[in-house]
Image (tube, rainbow, N blue to C red):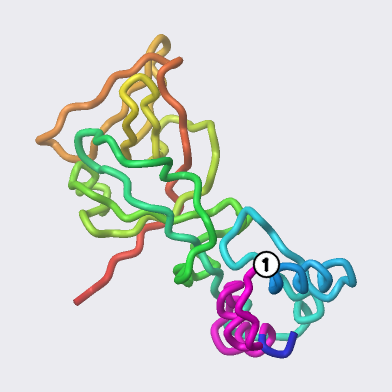
Amino acid sequence: MKFIEKRVRERGYPPTVREIGEAVSINSTSVVNYNLNKLVKEGFITRSKKISRGIGLPRLQEVPMRLVNEVVPVPMVGQIVAGEPALLPGDDFVYAEADSPIPVPLMLIGNNDPAQVFALTVNGQSMIDAMIDEGDIVILKRQDVAHNGDTVAAWLTERGETTLKRFFDEGERIRLQPANPTMQPIYVDKDKIQIQGKVLAVLRRVD
């Protein structure tokens, strides 16, 4: 508990199971999990399987800590193509505990549940006019519906491909519109697309 609290105060987000084991000299992650579950049962911590580093400290919620209040750890789950759709290995929307989640300002997430937020690295320049460039990180909220104009991560089921585009419902089909005048929109039948998430924010590294 002391180690978890110390890390939360220092970083603004909790440690991984592996980091806890190293700090308390326990080599087995299953033993760490066993003890964490005991702490959950006694009400000392909470745990969420839907978010990386999903340990919560209820007794610290009333303590005014700048980092806890202003940042939240968001798991990086892979890449998404902002160009022509490309086949990506595996399921980029299912993730295990990340070693290095991205600390994201809470103001960028708004009132959304942090457990439903994830990050992807952008590959391609089809959204360049929407200020989303190759190498940027997009922060998304998990959802399976979209409204016209939303920038979404879309899984094209028939092609087995994923892409980042603006969503438009045109009745019998969906138009996935790039924000790049040199690229053409993608048209897909409604039963051949799954919305995986809506973009909330974009992060860019400035060299």
- Element carrying mark 1: helix
The quadrant in which residue 127 appears is: top left
Question: Where residue 203 sits: x, y (%)?
Answer: 35, 64
**Residue in the picture at 63% in, 73% down:** 28
The quadrant in which residue 38 appears is: bottom right
- Considering only vertical position in the picture, is 35 above or below 135? below
Which quadrant: the N terminus?
Answer: bottom right
Judged left or right of residue 167, residue 141 is: right
The quadrant in which residue 6 appears is: bottom right
- Considering only vertical position in the picture, is 122 above or below 191? below
- Considering only vertical position in the picture, is 23 above or below 192? below
Question: Where residue 135 sits: x, y (%)?
Answer: 24, 59
Q: Is 26 in the magenta?
A: yes
Q: Nearer the viewer, residue 181 or 98?
A: 98
**Residue in the picture at 75% in, 71% down:** 36
* Residue farthest along the left direction in this orientation: 182
Question: Where residue 183 sits: x, y (%)?
Answer: 14, 33
Magenta stretch: give its range. Answer: 4-30
Judged left or right of residue 137, residue 46 is: right
Question: Where residue 162 sits: x, y (%)?
Answer: 34, 35
Q: Amino acid at mark 1?
A: Ser
The residue beneath circle 1 is 30
Which quadrant: the C terminus?
Answer: bottom left
- Considering only vertical position in the picture, is 59 above or below 128? below
Q: Nearer the viewer, residue 27 or 142?
A: 27
Characterize the local packing of mark 1: few (<14), some (14-19) or many (20 or more) Cα atoms within 10 angstroms: few
* Residue farthest along the top direction in this orientation: 172
Q: Is 13 in the magenta?
A: yes
Magenta span: predominant SS is helix
**Residue in the picture at 38% in, 14% down:** 189
